[in-house]
Image: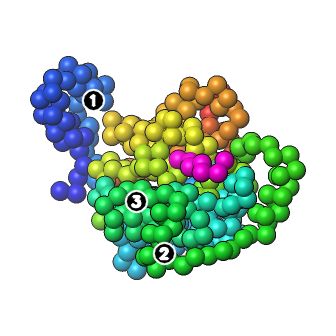
């Protein structure tokens, strides 16, 4: 084993498709992806990639977890925890910019190689939403918990209530109130939501995504980041993807799921991310006014990214060294 072949996937799919009478469709699909793809070895060197410049430190933390014997899921959780703990960050964790009522609300999710997932949305006063999401996944029969229910669950799991208010965020909010104009900002301070994809030395893939969401959003607004298939998606047979930017646009296109499904059909991570960005562009006349970026990894350990606008970067830690990679973007 240890080999992933598209042929294997297709023959498994063929049985199901024939049974429900989709054989002609499947035949066309087989032709479009090529009947025989060269099998490739699953990458087992371990790697981490995450959105934006602040991903560098999160990647290092995830790498430390790997070195200490941690699995992909631990790498993903602990990596993004580092970012959540930075209370000066204006776009992740309790220091994040508030909604238009002045309250910081957090969204996060996590997904493991076994296909299990957990998520919290519209969560307040808890420092590590990604860890609460992991508890939702591991300790409840559900995938998503929202608002007060998510908070109560967190408290029952031993997380502590935290009233922290970031003075910088409060100051920015007071300034915003003078005009109260809602406008998504492209590439906020060059760091935004953190979405992190981790691959361990077994070649298993997991991911986590955590954010305080768009600044000055309506109260109760939830973005893409905690939504499985939008802000994050993992299929351990294929790879993983995560997103940053205007959540509404990513939700409308099921962005991360789309990226993974395109990799399943043979696209490289970079090609799949570009195709998802083009889908966002086609569906939004105002696409020049906001940012969306995807990044992805496949089982061979290939990574890639693509964004609507210039300015998206991602942090990659592979073969023991970390680097910041500038993403390609739509130039027309
Ligand atoms: C959201 N995607 O809430 C997140 C936050 C983000 O630019 O990345 N903002 O829509």
Q: Position of residue 280 (x, y in %)?
A: 55, 32
Find residue 63 and report its horizontal and vertical position in percent.
47, 71
Mark 2 sits on what residue? 155
Given this view, does label 1 or label 3 mark the residue nearer the observer?
3
**To which quarter of the image does residue 116 belong?**
bottom left
Residue 46 highlighted magenta (yes or no) = no
Front residue of this view, candidates 172 and 267:
172
Which sits earlier in the primary sequence, circle 3 or circle 2? 3
Q: Residue at x 33, y 35 (%)?
A: 265
Of residues 216 and 284, the one drawn nearer to the viewer in this rendering: 216
Quadrant of the frame with the C terminus: top right
SS category of the residue bearing label 2? helix
Q: Is 140 drawn above or below residue 9 in the view shown?
A: below
Determine whether 254 is above or below 195 in the image. Answer: above
User: Which residue is drawn at the image coordinates 56% and 71% (left, top)?
Assistant: 126
Can residue 13 be seen?
A: yes
Mark 2 vs 1, N-terminal side? 1
Say if residue 131 shows up in the picture.
no
The residue wearing badge 3 is 118
Q: Residue furthest top?
A: 24
Left or right: residue 160 versus residue 118 is right
């Amino acid at each position: 084993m240890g080999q992933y072949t598209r042929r294997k996937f297709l023959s498994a799919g063929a049985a199901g498709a024939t049974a429900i009478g989709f054989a002609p469709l499947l035949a066309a699909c087989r032709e479009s992806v090529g009947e025989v793809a060269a099998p490739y070895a699953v990458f087992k060197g371990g790697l981490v990639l995450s959105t934006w410049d602040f991903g560098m430190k999160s990647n290092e933390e995830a790498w430390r977890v790997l070195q200490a014997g941690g699995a992909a899921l631990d790498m993903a959780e602990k990596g993004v925890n580092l970012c959540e703990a930075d209370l000066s960050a204006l776009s992740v964790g309790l220091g994040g910019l508030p909604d238009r009522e002045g309250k910081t609300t957090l969204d996060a999710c996590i997904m493991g190689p076994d296909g299990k997932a957990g998520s919290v949305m519209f969560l307040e006063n808890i420092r590590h939403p990604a860890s609460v999401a992991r508890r939702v996944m591991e300790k409840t029969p559900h995938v998503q918990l929202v608002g007060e229910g998510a908070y109560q669950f967190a408290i029952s799991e031993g997380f502590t209530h935290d009233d922290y208010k970031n003075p910088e965020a409060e100051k920015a909010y007071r300034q915003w109130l003078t005009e109260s104009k809602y406008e998504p900002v492209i590439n906020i301070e060059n760091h935004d939501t953190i979405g992190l994809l981790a691959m361990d030395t077994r070649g298993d893939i997991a991911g986590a995504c955590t954010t305080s969401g768009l600044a000055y959003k309506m109260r109760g607004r939830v973005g893409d980041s905690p939504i499985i298939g939008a802000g994050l998606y993992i299929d351990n047979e294929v790879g993983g993807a995560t997103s940053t930017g205007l959540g509404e646009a990513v939700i409308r296109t099921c962005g991360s799921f789309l990226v993974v499904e395109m990799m399943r059909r043979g696209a490289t991570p970079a090609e799949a991310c570009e195709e998802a960005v083009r889908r966002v562009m086609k569906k939004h006349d105002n696409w020049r006014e906001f940012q969306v970026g995807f990044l992805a990894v496949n089982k061979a350990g290939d990574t890639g990214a693509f964004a609507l606008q210039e300015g998206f970067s991602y942090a990659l830690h592979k073969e023991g060294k970390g680097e910041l990679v500038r993403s390609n973007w739509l130039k027309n």
